[in-house]
Amino acid sequence: MLACTVSVSAQYDLLSAKKGVIKGGYDFWVYTPDDYYFSQESTALIIFLHGASLCGRNLNRVLRYGPIDAVKMGRYIPALIVAPQNPGGAWNPKKLNDILEWMDKHYAYNKSRVYVLGMSLGGYGTLDFAGTYPEKIAAAIALCGGSTLKDYRKLGDLPLWIAHGTADRAVSVRESQKVVEGMQRLGVTSRLRFDWLQGASHGALARFFYTSKTYEWLFRHTLDDPWRPVDKEVDIKQNDLKNVYKDIERRTDQLEIELNSRDVEPLNDDDEEEEP
């Protein structure tokens, strides 16, 4: 459940709309975890990139699935979560970096613990962003996407997990496979892991956002790691995705929303969507 307010005193377990704060840039949400007061400089930052279905200029659409929706359900994610909205077209790595630079000025967090994950169009955005700024991203997860990068070499500089369903009819698994094959030809796969989920559809991989294993894997990486090795101990199988909601302790309270612009409309029932 969500409760909307225009002005709030709470600073933690809070969802804040950032609209028009970066000239020419993306609008975005920032989720502040409930223990942020105690953890500020050590807090991780997660950037979530949505798929094409959530593109537009209604920022509320970005809440339909992903890490913030998982928090809304009750999944504990001890991190700042940034969820920008793409108005349309490919994700722009420079505009995503602009958000990171804005966060540097307005929030305390651990700059060695910045993570990015996305699916579909957001999977493309994840690889394009990580491959452009690998020195800023501790680890990345790209789901059922691909990449528009002309050179995959820098994707080998960071721990990267690519996953795609073999029965995906929206974005062919070949799009992810081409990235993996390109990295293999370049010999830059020491930090890469990839999974082709047999029989999995496009929407099935959205469940990655709701399992605690996703965040456990991300948090095992930091820019301070010697040689930045990729973790291969945490595994996410199709059975994990099938049962992903069973261990979520459902919230009984409401996630509070701070609206910093009159252009952001309060969330209503029509803006919410069932679990993916």
Image (tube, rainbow, N blue to C red):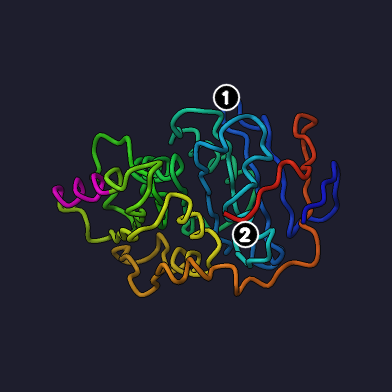
Disc with the residue nearer the chain's start (1 vs 2): 1
Above/below status of 235 relative to 1: below
Residue 261 is situated, as x and y percent measured from the top left of the image, at 77, 33
User: Which residue occupies the foreground of this view, 99 or 189?
Assistant: 189
Q: Residue at x 17, y 52 (%)?
A: 184
> What residue is at 30 percent from the left and 36 percent from the top?
149
Q: Is residue 86 magenta?
A: no
Q: Which residue is mark 1?
A: 24
Residue with the mark numbered 2 = 70
Magenta span of residues:
177-186
Q: Nearer the viewer, residue 204 or 86?
A: 204
Dot 1 and dot 2 residues touching (CB under 8 Å): no
Amino acid type indicated by mark 1: Gly
Instruction: Give the image location of residue 235, x and y in percent.
Output: 38, 71
Mark 2: secondary structure:
helix
- The quarter of the picture where residue 60 lies is top right
Query: Seen in the image, is 40 located left or right of residue 126?
Result: right
